[in-house]
Amino acid sequence: MRTFMDEAEEQVRNAGGENGSAGADGGKQVFVFRSAAELCASQRRSEWLIRPILDEKKLAMIFGEATGMKSFLAIDTGLCIATKQSWHHHQVGRQGPVFYICGEGFAGLNARIKAWSQHHKVDLADVPFFVSERPAQFLDHKGSVEVHAAVDELHNIHGQPALIIVDTLNRNFGPGDENSTQDMTKFVSAMDQLRIRYQCTVLIIHHSGWSASERARGASALRAALDWEYKMTKNGDGTRTFSCTKSKDHAEPPVLSFRPKVVSIDGWVDEDEEPVTSCVLEMLDQAIDPGKRNVLRGARRVAYEVLVSFGNESVHIDAWRNAAYRAGVSPSSSVNAKQKAFRRAVTDLLDAGLVKTENDYYRPAFTGQNRTFE
């Protein structure tokens, strides 16, 4: 279903082209208004790449310190979308080609991808995940054109991309200063050109600030343009925390934690005949808080994850219950057993403050640290 925003973006793409309508001066009209009634004539539903983490046709970013394993998570995200593998128990909504514009770490990238495929038991032969052989130069017009030409070539063979990953911003920025608002605005424009031209999501990988680790480095024009912003934090015990720091159109999804797992790649050895290893990220079950350590297990976890999967909308109890039944809230096939399991789960989630309700409609509370899983 075409939406108002789809039409608006098509107007941008067709500016000055045959699809524009004639204006008062006989030129092509590309700047138009829609009435409130037209805008609200039909519901605009989110099209999720990974629900509720990332939706389609958006500009997103993951930032963090150099050892935060941002690139590992980006590769993991791209490969899950390219293969439609579940992303850490989160549903992947659409499979599609993924283009990874690699600015650094190219030498070890094949080991990371191979470790992922071995860990997930995925044959890479027909996986539409493509990696650039060098960084892009997005502030250089020629460099940007070269990227479009390379994507066009594979687009014609494999179809519309679902995701383009730019890793990292600094190494793909080109001749400019990321602290300059003017230069950063040009970079954002280049990202929007990719997003609109290919109708896909663009995910930027970026470093945190030199003196302020709580924000991404560089001009604030970047953050202002983002639909999603995530922070990857390295913890003292070696785990990594993945938290949403900006969500433009949706409730912030739960905080997630990961632990690196070393994978020894079958049949690969280095120059000393030692096994080649790399890492994959495994999601951890976390304590919500010391008083609620056992809240999200079994039926409670199934019920909670089902409710989160509905996104930012309040859900009627009947719709939530039916979805929880389908998701296996009880291992028994008995309707009575399912009813009891779901009823107990709802009560526990309400008591724990993880769920809010009004007039038989429910939604995740998403407050403070209660967003993490046990």
Image (cartoon, grey):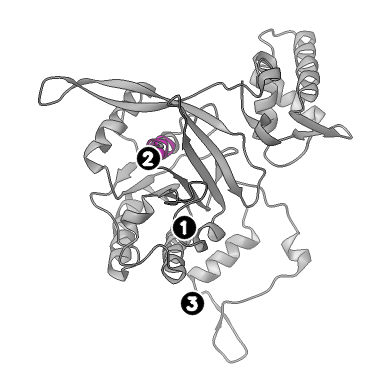
Q: Residue at x 47, y 27 (%)?
A: 258
Residue 339 drawn above or below residue 226: above
Q: Residue at x 58, y 46 (%)?
A: 245
- In the rendered image, the quadrant that contains the C terminus is top right
Within 10 angstroms of label 1, few (less than 14), some, or many (20 or more) residues? many
Q: Distance between the residues labelled 2 and 1?
A: 20 Å
Instruction: Say what amino acid the circle numbered 3 marks.
Output: Glu
Instruction: Say which residue label 2 marks.
Output: 71
Q: Judge whether residue 72 is colored magenta.
A: yes
Q: Is residue 48 visible?
A: no
Q: What stretch is highlighted in magenta?
A: 69-77
Return the x and y of residue 287 as percentages of the image width and height.
Answer: 61, 21
Q: Disc 2 or 1, which lies upstream in sequence?
A: 2
Q: Which of 5 and 349 is in front in this view?
A: 349
Depth check, mark 2 against mark 1: the one in front is 2
Any mark on residue 195, and which?
A: 1
Q: Disc 1 or 3, which lies upstream in sequence?
A: 3
Depth check, mark 1 against mark 3: the one in front is 1
Return the x and y of residue 154 as percentages of the image width and height.
Answer: 31, 51
Q: What element carries label 2?
A: helix
Within 10 angstroms of label 3, few (less than 14), some, or many (20 or more) residues? few
Instruction: Say what amino acid the circle numbered 1 marks.
Output: Arg
Q: What element carries label 3?
A: loop
| Count of marks placed on residues | 3
Instruction: Say which residue label 3 marks.
Output: 18
